[in-house]
Image (tube, coloured by chain):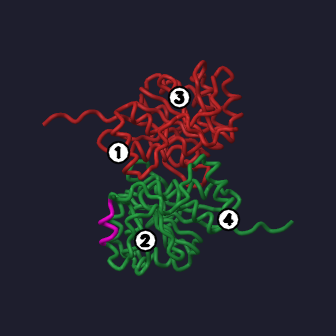
Chain colours: A green, B red
Amino acid sequence: MAASPRKLVVGGVLFPGFELLDIFGPLELFGLLRDKVEITLIGEQAGPVPSAQGPSAIIDQAFAQVESVDVLLIPGGFGVRQVVEHPEVLESLKRLHAGAQFTASICTGSALLARAGLLDGRKATTNKLSFDFPVAQGPRVDWQRRARWVEAGNIFTASGVSAGMDMALALIQRIWDRSTAKRAALEAEYIWNEDPDHDPFAPE
Amino acid sequence: MAASPRKLVVGGVLFPGFELLDIFGPLELFGLLRDKVEITLIGEQAGPVPSAQGPSAIIDQAFAQVESVDVLLIPGGFGVRQVVEHPEVLESLKRLHAGAQFTASICTGSALLARAGLLDGRKATTNKLSFDFPVAQGPRVDWQRRARWVEAGNIFTASGVSAGMDMALALIQRIWDRSTAKRAALEAEYIWNEDPDHDPFAPE
């Protein structure tokens, strides 16, 4: 019997006040690839953490317990405004990014990547209604006001909340192939906006 | 100072093997109505519960602790196949539905409503790739093979996973108004499929 290939480890970062759909939209789509993906939730300490909307999820592992992940996913939410001031979190994100195949942020999660300096000199986007805060965290970032998501090397950044699902499918396509991404969209009955330039929420 | 109006209580039902996006997609949209909505997660017992995709969430209150909710939301996921065999859960759903303004299922969550007899004589829909299982739970239901979601009196049923977000916005529109639903979609940068008959995942 052939040994089964190692699963791709997708690490989702949680903090108090994370935006529910930012993280659980993409994790739904990765999670549908049951035979290919293993999901772990990471944060400052293991245990329950409340979302911006109220419901709590469980952090499986503290940053210190995680040697590496293959894909690092960083949500936004009002909690980002506190977490940008935690240097240990920013250091952990830099360390995990350095070992990851891909790093991706959703919504204002881009503020954490920007503050960690990981977006310097790269194109990136973020939430269109909360554009100013992430931009202020990364003055050397080439911020895009019109983009559903942006692919800049191995860092993907999505626009607000739901845009993370379109980006997640693009990332799945990049890691595997188009048919794998289409299959995940089909199973989730998700109407995939496949064009990163189609951004109905960009300012006029 | 005028007393603030009572918030609408949205109760999301969790069980082991619930589908992440089924519940957290709609709860994101309701949760954006911060001044209008309070969310509680309900299940057989309070505490952590693993999703079908791996990540765990926290059940805030056991069914026995919950007198009533205003909106009852029921996700699908592979766990549904076990939960349809738990008569106490079905009784709790019947009791909470009786006191609720609206009850809504997402994906195979419809199997729980069907098994509890709550869909008898009503139009309903469910996941298009797992159509047979829910249908088998409710032979007296008028199942719709082509529908993004169905509104039947005060019970809404959505097609698979992502369809729950389109339905949630329709429910928000019904409870408040169209501008409130549009505002939630805008904040979530969600491309709302507003037409319940537009179902790209229906069989040919």
In this rendering, the count of numbered labels is 4
* Residue under label 4: A177
Residue A11 placement: quadrant: bottom right
Residue A79 placement: quadrant: bottom left
Of A35 and B168, nearer the camera is B168
Give the image location of residue A70, x and y in percent: 59, 71
Amino acid type at circle 4 is Asp
Q: What's the chain of the residue with tag 4?
A: A
| A199 w.r.t. B5: above or below | below
Direction from residue A185 to residue A121 in the image, left or right: left
* Residue under label 1: B183
Image point (60%, 18%), residue name:
B121
Cα separation, mark 2 vs mark 3, equals 45 Å
Callout 4: 10 Å neighbours few (<14), some, many (20+)? few
* Residue under label 2: A124
Amino acid type at circle 3 is Leu
